[in-house]
Amino acid sequence: MKALAERFRQMMSQHNLRITMSQLSEMTGVSPSQLRYWEKKHYIRSEQGEKNQNHLFPIQMLYRVCTIKFFLDQGYTLTNAVQKAEAHRESIKLFRQFVADQQLHVNQTGPNKAEISIGKIAEDPETEVYATINGDKTELHLRKQG
């Protein structure tokens, strides 16, 4: 499973995965004129071979545009929405690092049920933090080891 996650990360980070402005607009609900404006303001970026050629956006811009639009829809100004999107991106980056560092172990205990071992408490290495998922309910727990 770890190899599959790594393969997916590699695919998403490849620099040759591109979408057109019209595809980006259709997928996100952000008009092409808005996308051009955001690009002009350097909030998003595309690649354009020669003048008047189609703008091609790295696949990562799909997530960025969706996040900016989400904050705009919440009532933020464009500048604030971009700042919030950047802060959100940094939070996701840190969370990914947390998940990678913890080497989480997931034990599926039934349909829509699992127990996830998160790790030991730094101040008490005999105590482990784990999460249980039961349908749409997630809870954190502590347990003593051995």
Image: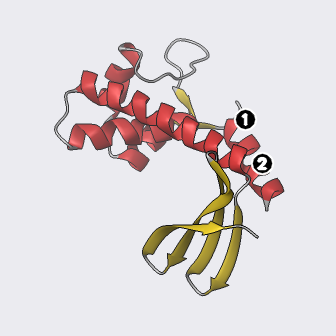
How packed mark 1 is, by other alpha carbons closer than 10 Å (few <14, some 14-19, many 20 or more), is few
Q: Is residue 133 left or right of residue 128?
A: left
Residue nearest the viewer, comparing 145 with 19: 145
Residue 126 locus on image (x, y percent):
69, 59
Q: Is residue 91 above or below residue 5?
A: above
How far apart are the alpha carbons under marks 2 and 1? 12 Å
Residue at 31%, 39% (x, y): give it.
Answer: 69
Dot 2: few (<14), some (14–19), or many (≥20) neighbours within 10 Å?
A: few
| Image quarter hosting the N terminus | bottom right
Q: Nearer the viewer, mark 2 or mark 1?
A: 2
Q: Residue at x 62, y 74 (%)?
A: 115
Q: Is residue 101 above or below residue 43?
A: below
Pick the residue in front: 18 or 135.
135
Q: Is residue 48 left or right of residue 4?
A: left
Q: How is the image coloured?
A: secondary structure
Can you give x and y, in whole percent of width and height, for residue 75 in the image?
16, 38
Q: Residue furthest left?
A: 75
Q: Quadrant of residue 117?
A: bottom right
Q: What label sits on residue 6 in the rendered view? A: 2
Can the viewer see residue 87?
Answer: yes
Q: Is residue 3 above or below residue 42?
A: below
Secondary structure under the numbered disc 2 in the rendered image: helix
Q: What residue is shown at x 34% (from left), y 26% (from top)?
A: 82
At horizontal 61% and vertical 77% (from top left) the residue drawn is 114
Q: Which mark is residue 56?
A: none
Which residue, given by chain and number where applicable, does mark 1 sit on? Answer: 14
| Amino acid identity at mark 2 | Glu
Viewer-closest of 73 and 98: 98
